[in-house]
Image (cartoon, coloured by chain):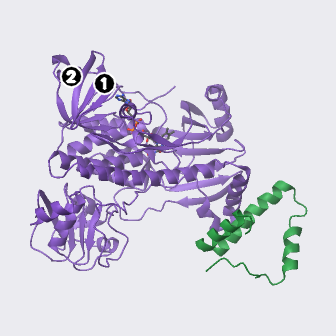
Chain colours: A green, B purple
């Protein structure tokens, strides 16, 4: 499997709102801690080491 | 402070110093720490006389190694001293990891059943060294020379000249081979000009041994960010004689001299153990840890082993554990070279195999240290996230790293291996240390590792030959047939070796698999034996002819 970089989320506006809203009442430190947990949860769900490496590389390059 | 009485081994002037004669010894070991003492025992076990020089006359002072893993115990068993260590030490299986005020998760080393030795024992380094010294003293091939400090070493093509300082002054010795086991600050390394590079961790640890009668279970407890020591980690471990080891992470800013004072240490421990627990401080020291290794384990006639060759942070208990395995790898090779059965090139495989293992240990120790001491705020958030998630979800538990159990590194890339050609199932690939298994000899229960010989051993499943040894050139491998010489009543040997009738293994003298085949073929065995002793293709053809 390769990192999927095409649209894959059914309701993008709704997802984005949910993500932002979930941190609305958190201070910066709490939000960063939550992000760390979220990354780990998602990474484990994906599991595929090659995909994770691709995603880490892609994020590190500034998304390009 | 300490209740342990340090033995004094006593200096004796050697005959060669008294007479002023320069004597050339086959093997001189520098340093009588756990690795130098093991080196002496293993060289002697392989028939070589050995002289050990140590600048001190007692055992390791203070709080050092605690945990010894199964493979070193197997090696010490081969050298006749594992049983008293296990008897004196404390065996444990359960580890608990706490985050803040809660249990994050717990693990069980769950040692596989049907092995002679436990996964891990805890024993103070001074007890361990005392046992090794006693074992050395009982061996007529070993001469321990205390208060003998090496002050210079010069190499010629086929020997080294050593200047040694004793209470009687300085004298000269020569050695065909030197095994440098003089610890992390090795003088010998400086004398030969070897590089020792790696990473120093920007952190300090307070290591305390305390005597107490507490009802803590015999488990390894590790806290991240506990209420009694906020922001840092703490480790509690049991040793023999009701002595407990406590490690407090202090951070880089801590002042070592200040932190060592009992006025500072006692309140820390009291906060941890509770007001009601009575304890007595045995020893306190402050360490900064590093992961480093020497550029080459062989520098001409000098072979480096133990901390002199590599240093690791102690999370995962790898220092002495891996040093003992250096010796396991080195002693048989050195004995073969000294007997003229193999060329010096065999000793280059010592570097190849053990530098590979050292790098693996350093990688593991560095990863554990990075988890325990996050270097940046974002990495600390990840670390804490792992610990929070681990409390509720199984997936995060394997990510928690407070030190991984030390296990042998297989020499998968070694030039001494004969690569697999046939499909023998199972994980006992060439370069792997032999798995033990319960067997029977003459109807009596026994252990498989005890049947492996001092030289090469061939083990075949089934009645494939009527020989008792396979010889080539200077070597004669003992041939063990499962069904003729040993029995496998539980079928565990066959299971652990993925064996069916005809399966054949060749073991090196250090009990590592050199080659394996699905059928018995003498020509292949002799070829593999010569390869495993470092003979090049030209030699192999000549010797096999
Ligand atoms: C806090 C702590 C915890 C540890 N926990 C563990 C653990 O749980 N498990 C584990 O396996 N390891 C552990 N280790 C590591 C372990 O202590 C070392 O790996 C081990 O002592 C190395 O043994 P060595 O024989 O190579 O060197 P050393 O023990 O350092 O011995 C070197 C010897 O050489 C002598 N010497 C030095 N220079 C000269 C000279 N010029 N001439 C003659 N003699 C000389 C010294 O006096 C000394 O006796 C721990 C270490 C520390 C600090």
Asked whether mark 1 and ligand 1 are closer than 8 Å, the reply comes as yes
Residue denoted by label 1: B148
Q: Residue furthest top?
A: B168
Residue B441 appears anywhere in the view: no
Under tag 1, what secondary structure? Answer: loop
**Quadrant of the rendered structure where residue A51 is?**
bottom right
> Where is residue B471 shown, x and y percent of the image?
11, 63
Chain ID for label 1?
A: B
**Quadrant of the rendered structure where residue A20 is?**
bottom right
Q: Is residue A51 rendered to the left or right of residue B117?
A: right
Q: CA distance from mark 1 to mark 2?
A: 10 Å
Residue denoted by label 2: B14
Q: Is residue B186 rendered to the left or right of residue B28?
A: right
Q: Answer yes or no: do the residues labelled 1 and 2 have beta carbons within 8 Å?
A: yes
Residue B154 appears anywhere in the view: yes
Q: Nearer the viewer, residue B409 or B484?
A: B409
Looking at the image, which residue is at 73% across and 45% down? B227
Q: Is residue B9 above or below residue B491?
A: above
View quadrant of ligand 1: top left
On the same chain, marks 1 and 2? The answer is yes
Q: Nearer the viewer, residue B315 or B84?
A: B315
């Amino acid at each position: 499997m390769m990192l999927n970089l095409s649209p894959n989320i059914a309701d993008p506006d709704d997802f984005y709102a949910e993500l932002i809203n979930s941190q609305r009442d958190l201070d910066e430190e709490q939000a960063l801690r939550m992000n760390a947990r979220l990354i780990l949860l998602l990474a484990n769900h994906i599991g595929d080491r090659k995909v994770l490496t691709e995603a880490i590389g892609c994020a590190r390059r500034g998304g390009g | 402070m300490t209740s342990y009485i340090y033995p004094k081994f006593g200096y004796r002037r050697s005959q060669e110093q008294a007479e002023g004669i320069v004597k050339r010894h086959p093997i001189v070991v520098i340093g009588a720490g756990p690795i130098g003492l093991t080196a002496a025992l293993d060289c002697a076990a392989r028939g070589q006389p050995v002289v050990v020089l140590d600048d001190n006359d007692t055992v390791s002072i203070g709080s050092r190694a605690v945990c010894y893993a199964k493979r070193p115990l197997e090696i010490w068993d081969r050298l006749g001293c594992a049983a008293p260590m296990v008897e004196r030490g404390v065996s444990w299986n359960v580890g608990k990891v706490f985050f803040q005020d809660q249990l994050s998760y717990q693990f069980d080393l769950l040692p596989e059943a049907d092995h002679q030795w436990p996964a891990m024992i805890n024993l103070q380094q001074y007890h361990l060294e005392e046992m090794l010294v006693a074992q050395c003293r009982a061996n007529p091939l070993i001469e321990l020379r205390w208060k003998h400090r090496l002050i210079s070493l010069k190499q010629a093509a086929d020997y080294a000249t050593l200047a040694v300082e004793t209470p009687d002054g300085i004298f000269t010795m020569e050695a065909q081979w030197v095994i440098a086991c003089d610890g992390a600050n090795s003088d010998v390394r400086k004398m030969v000009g070897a590089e020792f590079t790696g990473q120093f961790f920007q952190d300090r640890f307070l290591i305390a041994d305390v005597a107490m009668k507490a009802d803590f279970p015999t488990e390894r407890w590790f806290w991240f960010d506990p209420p009694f020591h906020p922001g840092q980690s703490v480790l509690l471990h049991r040793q023999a004689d009701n002595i407990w080891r406590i490690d407090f992470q202090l951070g880089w800013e801590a002042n070592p001299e200040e932190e060592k004072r009992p006025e500072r240490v006692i309140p820390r421990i009291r906060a941890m153990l509770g007001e009601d627990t009575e304890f007595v401080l045995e020893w306190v020291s402050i360490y900064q840890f590093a992961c480093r290794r020497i550029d080459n384990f062989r520098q001409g006639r000098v072979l480096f082993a133990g901390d002199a060759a590599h240093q690791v942070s102690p999370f995962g208990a790898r220092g002495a554990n891996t040093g003992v395995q250096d010796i396991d790898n080195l002693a048989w090779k050195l004995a073969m070279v000294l007997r003229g059965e193999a060329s010096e090139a065999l000793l280059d495989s010592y570097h190849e195999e053990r530098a590979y293992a050292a790098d693996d240990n350093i990688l593991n120790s560095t990863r554990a240290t990075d988890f325990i001491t996050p270097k940046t705020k974002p990495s600390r958030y990840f670390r804490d996230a792992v610990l929070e998630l681990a409390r509720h979800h199984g997936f995060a538990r394997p990510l928690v790293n407070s030190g991984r159990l030390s296990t042998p590194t297989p020499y998968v890339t070694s030039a001494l291996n004969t690569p697999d050609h046939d499909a023998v199932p199972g994980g006992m690939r060439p370069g792997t240390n032999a798995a033990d298994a319960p067997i029977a000899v003459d109807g009596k229960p026994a252990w498989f590792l005890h049947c492996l010989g001092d030289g090469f051993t061939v083990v075949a499943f089934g009645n494939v030959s009527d020989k008792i040894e396979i010889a080539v050139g200077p070597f004669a491998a003992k041939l063990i047939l499962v069904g003729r010489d040993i029995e496998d009543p539980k079928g565990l040997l066959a299971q652990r070796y993925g064996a069916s009738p005809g399966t054949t293994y060749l073991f090196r003298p250090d009990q590592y698999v050199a080659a394996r085949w699905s059928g018995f073929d003498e020509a292949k065995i002799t070829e593999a034996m010569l390869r495993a002793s470092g003979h090049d293709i030209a030699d192999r053809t000549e010797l096999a002819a």
